[in-house]
Image: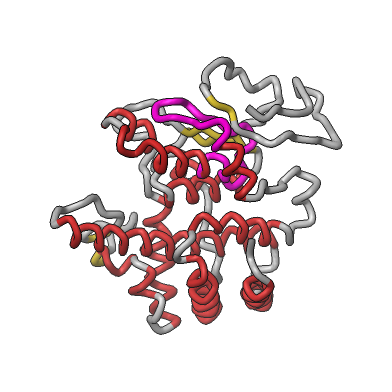
Amino acid sequence: MITGATKSKVDAIWQKMWEGGITNPIEVISQLTYLMFMRSLDEKELETEKMEQMLGTELDHIFPETYRNSYGAQIPGDQLRWSRFKDLPAQEMYRVVNEFAFPFIKQLGDESAFAKAMESVTFGFPAGKPSLLERAVDGVEGLLSEFDDHVGDLGDLYEYMLSKLSTAGTNGQFRTPQHIRNMMVSMVDPKPGELICDPACGTAGFLISAAEHIRSAYESQMTGGDWDSYAGKNGAAPQFSGFEIDQTMLRISTMNLMLHGVDAPDVRYLDSISKNNTVSGKYDVVLAKRWIRTVIPDNAVCGFALVA
């Protein structure tokens, strides 16, 4: 659970965005999420570099040696990293993020759920106000430094930001606390190779708890095929699936899963209780809290989902 001091930092960043002209709450959350993701990618890359030093072997990296954007401009890949651009002068920082770092994160995962969720998004910081991006980057750096050792708690941070939306409760966007998720996952005990689904995944909290449980309890027993399914790579059926009707949540959930080693989950836009959902008998484990809707659409087939 986040503290009052952390909430104050979120509020301060939110106020800076508002003063800078980004006043739509959804847009504020989206733009801050992209910045948070950029920083988290750099932290993950640092972990890979440390692991390489320990093992003395080369591992897969997130950032390429060089990166060329869609206009043909090219920069060294390390310039895409948060730790490289966060201290640049405002105008230069804006150029790097707008022309290179943001397009780079949009293309991550090729045809993955993340890439599809990011397909139509745009960089929302106004070109005439590079200092706004600079202030937002400074704010995110100060905010996320508290979460470096427990990235799983980022869901609490997203939940607080989402609470600022007047539609959050109406749309059923209530996050299950981490300790409740972990207890439920421990009782169900999902295993390597089992297909797992959350039919209303939100920020992917249940799927992340399941992924962490599998790594913790069964890592030593997992085969190459199990790892391919876990990450959704090499043509294996993705182990983790989630459905969501909110595009912002789709983007957050795919980012969250990527940061936990699930590179290509099957996360997609779908109303699980509508007649458009034709999935049946596919999953070994379904993890969800009970839904309660005050308004059930005409094409709904039920008003709630049972916990597995």
Quadrant of res 74: bottom left
Residue visible at 69% across and 72% down in the picture? 4
Position of residue 136 relative to residue 266, above or below, is: below
124 vs 70, left or right, is: right
Residue visible at 65% across and 69% down in the picture? 3
56 vs 119, left or right, is: left
The residue most toward the top is: 281
In magenta segment, residue 55: no
Which sits in the foreground, 188 or 168?
A: 188
The residue most toward the bottom is: 89
Residue visible at 13% across and 57% down in the picture? 56
Q: For residue 44, say whether it is visible.
A: yes
Quadrant of res 69: bottom left
Magenta stretch bounds? 186-208
Residue visible at 28% across and 30% down in the picture? 223
206 vs 271, left or right, is: left
Image quadrant in which the C terminus is located: top right
Which sits in the foreground, 250 or 48?
A: 48
Q: In the image, residue 48 lies at what x, y percent?
A: 28, 58
The residue most toward the right is: 294
Which sits in the foreground, 155 or 233?
A: 155
Position of residue 254 relative to residue 132, above or below, is: above
Counting the numbered discs, the total is 0
What colouring method underlies this structural image?
secondary structure
Q: For residue 129, say whether it is visible.
A: no
Q: In the image, residue 15 lies at what x, y percent?
A: 68, 76
27 vs 44, left or right, is: right
Image quadrant in which the N terminus is located: bottom right
In magenta segment, residue 187: yes
Q: In the image, residue 269 lies at what x, y percent?
A: 59, 35
Q: In the image, residue 148 lies at what x, y percent?
A: 45, 66
